[in-house]
Amino acid sequence: MLDRLRSALSDAIKSLASRALRKTITEEDVDEVLEELKLRLLESEVAFEVAEKLAERVKQRLVGLTVERGWDAEKAIASALREALLEVLGRPGPDLVEEAKRRCGGERPLVVVFLGVNGVGKTTTIAKLAYLMKRSGVTPVLAAADTFRAGAQEQIEAHASRLGVPLVKGRYGSDPASVAFNAVEYARARNYCVVLVDTAGRMHVDYDLMGEMRKIVRVVKPDFKVLVVDALTGNDAVEQARRFNEEVGVDGFIITKVDSDVKGGVAVSIAEATGKPILYLGMGQRYEDLQRFDPEKLVDSILPER
């Protein structure tokens, strides 16, 4: 997992450390290594402008750093790189489970609408979050507002049945905004704390379906709009994130298939390119395989151990 990004960072640290022993690091020392690092980041599917910004952050921390005799140069440089990565990834995001708990007993349930293109694992991710919420004592209502894709209603219905959570659905071809609205009213009338709204997978260039998404948002006024992206789609995930954010507005991301991602650039790119937080990581196929995003844990996993 994330092996290519880890390798790129490790090589940069070693190269910089070899130049830094017993002297102050100069701009010349840094520039050559960072050019190589940028190329390696691009190979790891970090977006070009993000690689540039990250390299600049590292440069600002390293130029002028004096590595004294007896210091571990690699540790000092890794620390600077860690700070730069945490600046990108460390934006705080809501814990949706705790947000749902706080909404219990209120006048309106917490409403979370999930967005994403076809095939990213959006419906399964919703089921994983429903499982996580139920384990924490909050039973969500699922809204099957994907009335577009054949089999979508049956897929989320199967998850709802296995999890033992209520589902509100509509006919294929019916108005998805009305399904989402009915789910919110169902939850409100029965004192459920949270509604998780599944929507049709759509390409980010599909204007008609984006219009439909804006209608759902306008009708149910969600508390959070969460975009689900697939780690394996690389830089296309960044383009999806930008487009959905421009068209609908995104409050945070869930990245799926992180356990299969050897490159590792998607998380860094999305966080930097949009300025929005990563909320959860999908790490496998089981309901249990959804982890709250911990930026320090991710950064420590891609920097070499010391």
Image (spheres, rainbow, N blue to C red):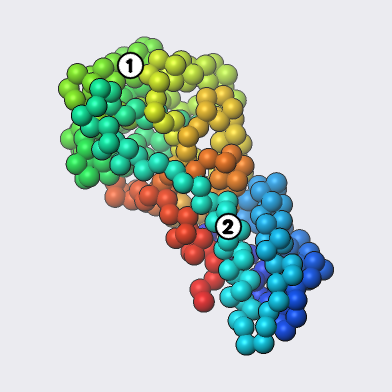
Tag count in the figure? 2
Disc 2: which residue:
85
Residue 255 drawn above or below residue 213: below
Marks 2 and 1: in contact by CB < 8 Å?
no
Crowding at label 1, few (<14), some or many (≥20) Cα neighbours within 10 Å? some
Between residue 69 and residue 182, name the one nearer to us: 69
Q: Amino acid at mark 2?
A: Leu
Question: Mark 1 or mark 2: which comes first in sequence?
Answer: 2
Question: Which numbered marker is on residue 181?
Answer: 1
Crowding at label 2, few (<14), some or many (≥20) Cα neighbours within 10 Å? many
Between residue 137 and residue 35, name the one nearer to us: 137
Residue 183 drawn above or below residue 297: above
Query: Residue 14 appears at what percent x and percent y?
Result: 66, 75
- What residue do we see at 63% from left, 51% from top? 46
Between residue 90 and residue 184, name the one nearer to us: 90
Q: Amino acid at mark 1?
A: Phe
Left or right of 55 in this view: 238: left
Query: Residue 66 appears at what percent x and percent y?
Result: 71, 76
Q: Residue furthest bottom?
A: 70
Query: Residue 116 appears at what percent x and percent y?
Result: 48, 32
Foreground tag (1 vs 2): 2
Left or right of 124 in this view: 239: right
Residue 101 drawn above or below residue 92: above
Q: CA distance from mark 1 to mark 2?
A: 40 Å
Q: Is residue 85 in view from this perspective?
A: yes
Query: Residue 293 appears at what percent x and percent y?
Result: 42, 50
Residue 258 drawn above or below residue 59: above
- What residue do we see at 26% from left, 41% from top? 133
